[in-house]
Amino acid sequence: MDVMNSSLSAVLFDEKTIQNRIREMGAELSKVFADETPVMICTLSGAVTFLSDLMRYTAIPLEIDFLSISSYGNSSKSSGIVQIRKDIDIEIKGRHVIIIEDIVDSGLSLNYLKEYLFKQEPKSITTCVLLSKPSAHKVEVQIDYLGFEIEDEFVVGYGLDYAEKFRNLPYIGILKKEVYT
């Protein structure tokens, strides 16, 4: 862990802060969907840690599924081109869908996902995002439930990666520029 810690310039959110906010988000979702069984659709791989904790704090019946998209590759900036690598398996027509996303940078990926899933005629689509960088948004994006707003920094940990590394940090930190430039 020391090697990973030395690659960070700062810790933005410690474990306790993250867990407290996710607990609040789970309680909010439990109230809104109290009489429903929504489908949480998690974007792989970054949002898995978030989903894992969020679903434990959501006190209603729910189903989960996974969707893998790519717009980064091994870069620190989005290419702007979203590709689906793995589609969902659950039928969502007429169902309440909650998109679970780790981070919104440009907003292009989340908007693409919403458009893509709306074609499958769900009853509703709700977005639940751990982190958002408003200053990096290239398009207007609707986030229904948000963990934290952050500045336009490259962050890792708690599922977020750089070149598939750092996901296993239990907190979120800012990656030093010399690591990814």
Image (cartoon, rainbow, N blue to C red):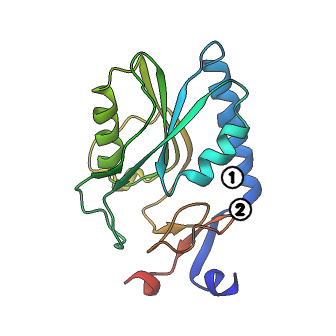
Q: Residue 14 carries which label?
A: 2
Q: Which residue lies furthest to the top in this view?
A: 35
Q: Disc 1 marks which amino acid?
A: Ile
Q: Which of 52 and 143 is in front in this view?
A: 52
Q: Nearer the viewer, residue 46 or 143?
A: 46
Picture coordinates of residue 75 (x, y %)? 34, 73
Q: Nearer the viewer, residue 176 or 79?
A: 79
The quarter of the rendered structure image containing the N terminus is: bottom right
User: How many marks can you see?
Assistant: 2
Cα distance in 3D space between marks 1 and 2: 6 Å
Instruction: Find numbered disc 2 in the image and state the secondary structure of the residue it sits on.
Output: loop
Q: Are marks 1 and 2 in contact (CB under 8 Å)?
A: yes
Instruction: Find numbered disc 1 in the image and state the secondary structure of the residue it sits on.
Output: helix
In this image, 48 relative to 88: left or right?
right
Where is mark 1, residue-wise? 18
Q: Residue furthest front?
A: 89
Above or below residue 174? Residue 116 is above
Name the residue located 69 percent from the left edge and 64 percent from the top edge.
170
Say if residue 140 shows up in the picture: no
Above or below residue 68? Residue 2 is below
Q: Where, by quadrant of the figure, is residue 123 drawn?
A: top left
